[in-house]
Image: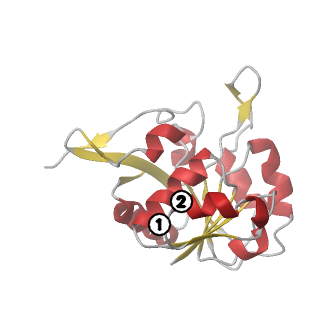
Amino acid sequence: MKIGTIGAGNIAQAFVRHAAQAGFEVVVSSKSGPAALTDLAATLGQGVRAGTVEEAVQADLVLLSVPWDAVANVLEQVPSWKNQILVDTTNAIHFPDFQPLDLGAKTSSEIVAEQAPGARVVKGFNTLAAALLAASPSESGGQRVVVVSGDDAAAKADVLALISKMGFAGLDLGGLSTGGRLQQFGGAFSGVNLVKLPA
């Protein structure tokens, strides 16, 4: 599986480091362009390189990690999705009061899915603070849990397999409507650090 990122902030960097350690090739991209990311990419692990957004979205799995107010504009620039997995790490937050945005009846990831037709959207890697996500997946004799939700079972299975290869424990919360509501900002799993202990 080849991996690309749209965005190169702290969450994306934490994700990429774990992916690189697990042996995956990753193309990191952002609106700044590859030249601005070359030095950063070199620090993230073997097999990581800077590229354009156009290159990143050719990967089998694409991590979307940009501020919520940039999501629509970023996805508008992707001409077409060809059944790739799009892992949505975004959180719909109102600044400066740091409150969940009112999205009506839809979850943030349902909105992302509408804006990325042809992609198989899986919500994930959005509930933990960047520093915690960047830390070792091993904690207190167990594995840190990464929760996911999505409407495509095969896409979720691939993301859960990736999570396992990174050393985390994956937890499937269901579809984007029900599970996505639990894990989006302000939901029951938002900011919760769970550890799966050995049986």
Left or right: 69 in relation to 151: right
Q: Looking at the image, do the residues carrying marks 1 and 2 touch, with CB atoms under 8 Å apart?
A: yes
Where residue 150 appears, x then y in whole percent? 54, 58
For mark 2, give the secondary structure.
helix
Residue that appears at 49% across and 38% down: 131
Q: Is residue 23 above or below residue 166?
A: below
Where residue 189 appears, x then y in whole percent? 47, 36
Q: Is residue 187 above or below residue 58?
A: above
Kind of residue at badge 2: Leu
Residue that appears at 54% across and 33% down: 187
Q: Quadrant of residue 42?
A: bottom right
* Front disc: 1 or 2: 2
Distance Cα–Cα, label 1 vs label 2? 7 Å
Left or right: 166 in relation to 103: left
Q: Quadrant of residue 40?
A: bottom right
Q: Quadrant of residue 31?
A: bottom right
Q: Nearer the viewer, residue 72 or 58?
A: 58
Identify the mark at residue 44; answer none if there is no mark.
2
Where residue 26 appears, x then y in whole percent? 57, 70
Kind of residue at badge 1: Ala
Residue marked by disc 1: 20
Q: Is residue 1 above or below residue 13?
A: below
Q: Earlier in the sequence, mark 1 or mark 2?
A: 1
Left or right: 157 in relation to 70: left
Q: Is residue 101 above or below residue 73?
A: above
Residue that appears at 45% across and 70% down: 158
Where residue 196 appears, x then y in whole percent? 26, 45
Q: Residues within 10 Å of mark 2 (few under 14, many from 20)?
A: many
Left or right: 43 in relation to 132: right
Q: Nearer the viewer, residue 128 or 153?
A: 128
Q: Is residue 147 visible?
A: yes
Q: Residues within 10 Å of mark 1 (few under 14, many from 20)?
A: some
